[in-house]
Amino acid sequence: MPDTEKIEQYVKDQEQKTSLGKVNLNKDRPMVGEIGYIEVPIKDLPSQGLFYPEGTQIVIRAASVAEIRHWSTIDETNYSNMDDILNFVIEKCVKIKFPDRPSTWKDIKDIDRFYLIFAVREFTFKNGENKLYVPGKESERIEVTKDMISYFTMEDRIKKFYDHESKSFIVRKNERISHDVQFFIPSIGVAQFIKSYVQGKQRENKEFDESFIKFGNFIFEDWRSLTLNSYEKAVSDSIGWDIGTISLYDKFTELLASGVDPKIIYKSGGMEQEAPLNFSGGIKSLFIISDILDELV
């Protein structure tokens, strides 16, 4: 089998590993009111719904024992494993519906993923069975809820380029860049493809354009259009960028990436305080009761 076919097959295999059931297009099925599901207002997401079609709906359900059991295998020292298990919970417990076309969990924006995981967690432990704390100032223990976490901040320098119609950022052609440049907030599907692409190349000990990875997450609008050929064509096209275009991609993607900085915002002594998102018991404690022994008599 040629090298390109091996890599493409690896990408497909990785997608199948993190998508254990058939893709649900949910085009005509109503979302709100489904038994066991509650709606998450799209305006409450870190993205504020800015990068989804108008009328998009998202609902969640509680994690089952089987899903929590799978969650217990998460390895926080292995980014790929952790990423796959986060996606597993999203796939199983979150549904998204676009008003005008089919949609799946892969259409959820990557910046909204952790908020939705946290929402699933709170719905799973709605009676407070698994409280979560982070250390605050002066030995404070801060109980964390999803609405206390600041996930994403958009800098003023890039806000002005937001285009409401395309749900993306567009920088128009000017004296410094030779053509319009469009940036998309990456979906889970796009991020998943690029991760699998890199892993496939590494697995085959093949070189790939590492500099393009930084830009790639923000270039592709829809994971459905991503194939080995379309991705590598985009890499090839990027070789022809002028210095102004390269500089724009570098700075814009840097600002978008740096805007993802999860932290806890809480009130103490009448003032707003910040604390790092560093749970006692690690990320595993989102669904596993880390101090279970201390609670037993």
Image (cartoon, rainbow, N blue to C red):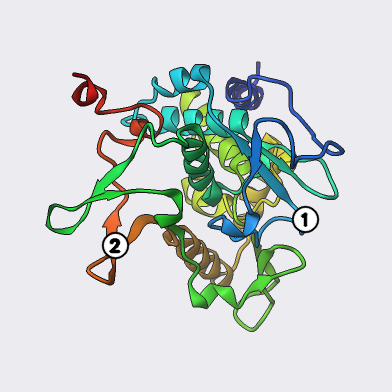
Question: In the image, is 63 to the left or to the right of 1?
Answer: left
Residue 260's image quarter?
A: bottom left
Tell me residue 219's x, y (percent): 63, 55
Look at mark 2 in the image and give the residue it sits on: 274
**Seen in the image, is 284 located left or right of residue 49?**
left
Q: Report the number of numbered marks.
A: 2
- The x and y percentages for residue 217 are 57, 50
Q: Nearer the viewer, residue 261 or 251?
A: 261
Q: Residue furthest bottom?
A: 175
In which quadrant of the rendered view does residue 32 lie? top right
- Residue 94 in the image: above or below residue 260: above
Name the image quarter holding the C terminus: top left
Separation of residues labelled 1 and 2 (CA atoms)? 33 Å
Most extreme residue toward the left is: 138
Percent position of residue 178, x then y: 67, 74
Could you say whether the residue bearing mark 2 is in a helix, strand or loop?
strand
Residue count near mark 1 (Cα–Cα under 10 Å), binned few <14, some 14–19, many ≥20: few
The quadrant of the picture occupied by the N terminus is top right
Q: Determine if residue 206 is in view.
A: no
Q: Position of residue 152 (x, y in %)?
A: 47, 59
User: Mark 1 or mark 2: which comes first in sequence?
Assistant: 1
Seen from the viewer's position, the closer of residues 194 and 38 is: 38
Amino acid at the residue labelled 1: Gly
Is residue 163 shown to the viewer in this render? yes
Binning the other alpha carbons within 10 Å of mark 2 as few (below 14), some (14 to 19) or many (20 upward) gives some
- Report the residue marked by disc 1: 55
219 relative to 273, above or below: above
